[in-house]
Amino acid sequence: MDAVVTLYRPTGPKELALVAASGWKRWPPRLPEQPIFYPVTNEAYARQIAERWNVKESGAGFVTRFAVKRAFLERYERQLVGAREHEEYWIPAEDLEALNDAIVGEIEVVAAFGGGA
């Protein structure tokens, strides 16, 4: 069994700037209206969200990729939220620091969409 799981996160420019400020190592704390951090399990789904939602909301959308220790993710179930490829993890905001501690390597940008990309 692999020790890490690769996840993806669609994000807008503000969140991406905070990730960059962390040295590409950590996700920023959730805002009060964001009780869940939801990384997704595949790049295609992350691209859909970044291009359709993040660009509409903030003018640019980005797809990030990062690896997390499998032992951390084992306490969460994958959530199917639409079609077969719409699969994500729901990490409660209070568990985000533990997730950040379980990141292996750096968070990297793998796609960019929109005028600010």
Image (cartoon, rainbow, N blue to C red):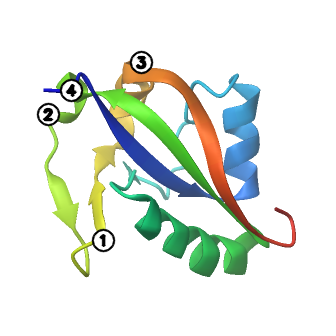
Where in the figure is residue 9, as x and y percent of width and height?
49, 52
What's the amino acid at mark 2?
A: Glu
Task: Say left or right for 115 vs 113.
Answer: right
Image quadrant holding the C terminus, namely bottom right
| Residue for badge 2 | 74
The answer to whether any part of residue 30 appears in the image is: no
What's the amino acid at mark 4?
A: Asp
User: Which one is in front in this view, the residue at disc 2 or the one at disc 4?
Assistant: 4
At 55% from the left and 35% from the top, the residue drawn is 27
Lower sequence index among marks 2 and 3: 2
User: Which type of secondary structure does the marked residue at label 1 adopt?
Assistant: loop
For label 2, the crowd category at 10 Å Cα-Cα, with few meaning under 14, some 14 to 19 and many 20 or more, is few
Where in the figure is residue 82, as x and y percent of width and height?
26, 80
C-alpha separation, residue under disc 4 versus residue under disc 3? 18 Å
Q: Quadrant of residue 88?
A: bottom left
For label 4, the crowd category at 10 Å Cα-Cα, with few meaning under 14, some 14 to 19 and many 20 or more, is few
The answer to whether any part of residue 117 appears in the image is: yes
C-alpha separation, residue under disc 2 versus residue under disc 1? 19 Å
User: Which type of secondary structure does the marked residue at label 4 adopt?
Assistant: loop
| Residue for badge 1 | 86
What's the amino acid at mark 3?
A: Asp
Contact check, label 1 and label 3, Cβ < 8 Å: no
C-alpha separation, residue under disc 2 versus residue under disc 3? 15 Å
Q: Which mark is residue 101?
A: 3
User: Which one is in front in this view, the residue at disc 4 or the one at disc 1?
Assistant: 4
Lower sequence index among marks 1 and 3: 1
| Residue for badge 4 | 2
Q: Quadrant of residue 53?
A: bottom right
At 64% from the left and 70% from the top, the residue drawn is 54
Contact check, label 4 and label 3, Cβ < 8 Å: no
What's the amino acid at mark 1?
A: His
For label 1, the crowd category at 10 Å Cα-Cα, with few meaning under 14, some 14 to 19 and many 20 or more, is some
